[in-house]
Image (tube, helix red, strand yellow):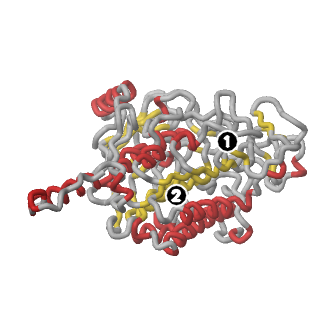
């Protein structure tokens, strides 16, 4: 409550006291959490693609597929050329994105089955919880893949918790894991959408459950055949990873998924247009199974993989159109990125290899999804905030693990001890105010790698050099590797034997980082 001032001459406010009062009001509005409510910070929309490679967008050089809506963002905003997911696979990237902690620090953060328990502890700081305490309304729509429910997994026929609502999100509409994993249902907040009591859902990842047909035993029922794995329970004519029975009325239709998720994302924007919001829109595209809506079939000449890139771009365009219609574009920070690099054949015979042609999904980089080479984690990142971000291109070294500290700073929040232990505030680089991002970043696949300026050191690791199923170079080498990316962007010539001192220096630095105790957010 404001103090009550007397109207008598003795108690009247003189000019000095008026100035002091105005200063006090300004100071209070600058406190964390109050700035957002008064319009000082923007809405935030993070559009997060799945398996979208650096070279899969026309603004990054793709010629055989056009992405005009992402190109529009790049034209009106900032396109980054050295931005990274925290890992070369989805679950660890998403864990790092939300928690500000490298996933390799925590066991159990590898690629999860669809019935895994929630791997982020309720109560810890996340992107959603930090922005929520700053006054944002927070929502997640789309792919989750961070587990749901308690140890032992969720009961899909009851209330499903803990989940996003226990991590700071006000609203969630999810694909529990991936499109190629059961359960093939949507979960809105804590309930499966469309489930009927008389048809209970059961999910298993060991032995078969129920009597549902499988791709292995009933290939005649398939409209898309697997190339490797993916031969278990059939849903919508496509066999998946894992076994599922029941929930027939709740099962998704793959061809409709992009429309369903985009409608939910736009509904969140419409509902919260009068208050500051954070939307984490995590699309299914362009992950397998690649089953575009009929209006996108044949749009690119590259088969389903190219067509779902066009479909993803449409999703971006629908969100941008909604922001324009709601007159929110000028006060909304929109970012588009991907959870890891690209993969062509990831388990289904969908003509992705046969129709690839001269398209280079990873652009100039070596490797892709699952790989410690640059193509595994170097991903597209485009940011637009009209009037604040000046259009252009930036080569600042950025990582998605830093979104927590950076968005916290944007919203006037300070991270406490233990919050976002690996997250660095790179907001100035993200907004284009400087070309300096991180000094170094750790990349994760099988082995770890350390990027430091133009240098990249990959730690020694035994194992196969190439994933035979996906035909991806993994980057395993028993001696380790060292590259100078400015001279050798394709990572073709390891300098580990010629530059022994540099290799030793980076090896020791990587060991130091691995052993650092998490004591709070790092500073730039």
* Residue at (44% x, 70% y) in the render: 329
Residue 179 appears left or right of 317: right
**Would residue 487 be seen by someone viewing this image from the given angle?**
no
Q: Which of 419 and 198 is in front in this view?
A: 198
Q: Please say whether residue 379 is visible from this viewpoint.
A: yes
Observer-nearest of 318 and 332: 332
Residue where numbered disc 2 is placed: 47
Q: Where is residue 491 in the image (x, y as percent from the top left)?
A: 43, 45
Label 2 secondary element: strand
Q: Is residue 299 above or below residue 86?
A: below
Compared with 10, 476 (above or below) is above
Find the distance from the CA under tag 1 to the CA under tag 2: 29 Å
Picture coordinates of residue 310, whole percent (x, y) = 61, 67
Image quadrant in which you'd find residue 385: bottom left
- The residue at which mark 1 appears reads as 469
Q: Which of pointers 1 and 2 indicates the residue nearer the eye?
A: 2
């Amino acid at each position: 409550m404001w103090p009550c001032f007397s109207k008598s001459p003795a108690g009247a406010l003189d000019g000095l006291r008026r100035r002091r009062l105005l200063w006090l009001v300004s100071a209070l509005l600058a406190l964390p959490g109050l700035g957002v409510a008064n319009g000082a910070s923007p809405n935030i929309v993070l559009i997060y693609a799945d398996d979208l490679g650096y070279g899969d967008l026309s603004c990054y050089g793709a010629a055989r597929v056009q992405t005009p809506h992402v190109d529009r963002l790049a034209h009106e905003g900032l396109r980054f050329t050295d931005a990274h997911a925290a890992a070369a696979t989805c679950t660890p990237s998403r864990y790092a994105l939300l928690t500000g902690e490298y996933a390799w620090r925590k066991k159990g953060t590898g690629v999860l089955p669809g019935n895994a328990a929630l791997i982020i502890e309720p109560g810890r700081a996340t992107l959603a919880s930090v922005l929520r305490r700053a006054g944002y309304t927070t929502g997640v729509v789309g792919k989750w893949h961070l587990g749901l429910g308690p140890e032992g997994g969720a009961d899909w026929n009851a209330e499903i918790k803990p989940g996003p609502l226990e991590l700071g999100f006000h609203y969630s509409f999810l694909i529990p894991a991936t499109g190629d994993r059961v359960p093939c249902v949507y979960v809105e907040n804590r309930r499966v959408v469309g489930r009927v009591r008389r048809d209970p859902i059961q999910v298993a990842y060991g032995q078969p459950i129920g009597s549902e047909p499988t791709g292995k035993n009933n290939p005649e029922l398939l409209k898309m055949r697997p190339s490797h794995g993916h031969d278990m329970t059939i849903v919508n004519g496509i066999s998946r990873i894992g076994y599922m029975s029941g929930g027939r009325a709740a099962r998704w239709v793959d061809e409709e998924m992009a429309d369903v998720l985009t409608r939910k994302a736009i509904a969140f924007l419409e509902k919260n247009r009068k208050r500051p919001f954070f939307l984490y829109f995590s699309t299914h595209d362009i992950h397998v199974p690649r089953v575009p809506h009929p209006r996108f079939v044949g749009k690119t000449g590259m088969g389903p993989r190219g067509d779902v890139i066009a479909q993803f771009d449409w999703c971006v365009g629908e969100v941008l159109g909604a922001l324009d219609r709601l007159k929110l574009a000028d006060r909304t920070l929109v970012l588009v990125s991907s959870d890891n690099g690209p993969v062509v054949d990831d388990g289904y015979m969908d003509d992705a290899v046969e129709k690839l042609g001269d398209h280079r999904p990873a652009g100039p980089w070596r490797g892709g999804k699952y790989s410690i080479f640059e193509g595994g984690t170097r991903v597209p990142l485009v940011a637009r905030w009209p009037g604040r971000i000046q259009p252009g291109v930036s080569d600042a070294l950025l990582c998605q693990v830093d979104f927590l500290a950076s968005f916290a700073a944007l919203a006037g929040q300070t991270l406490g001890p233990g919050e976002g232990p690996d997250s660095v505030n790179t907001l100035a680089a993200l907004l284009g105010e400087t070309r300096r991002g991180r000094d170094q970043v750790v990349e994760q696949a099988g082995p770890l790698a350390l990027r430091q300026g133009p240098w990249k050191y990959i730690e020694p690791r035994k194992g196969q050099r190439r994933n035979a199923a996906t035909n991806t170079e993994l980057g395993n080498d028993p001696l380790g590797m060292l590259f100078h990316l400015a001279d050798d962007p394709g990572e073709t010539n390891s300098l580990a034997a010629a530059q022994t001192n540099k290799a030793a220096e980076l090896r020791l630095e990587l060991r130091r980082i691995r052993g650092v105790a998490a004591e709070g957010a790092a500073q730039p």
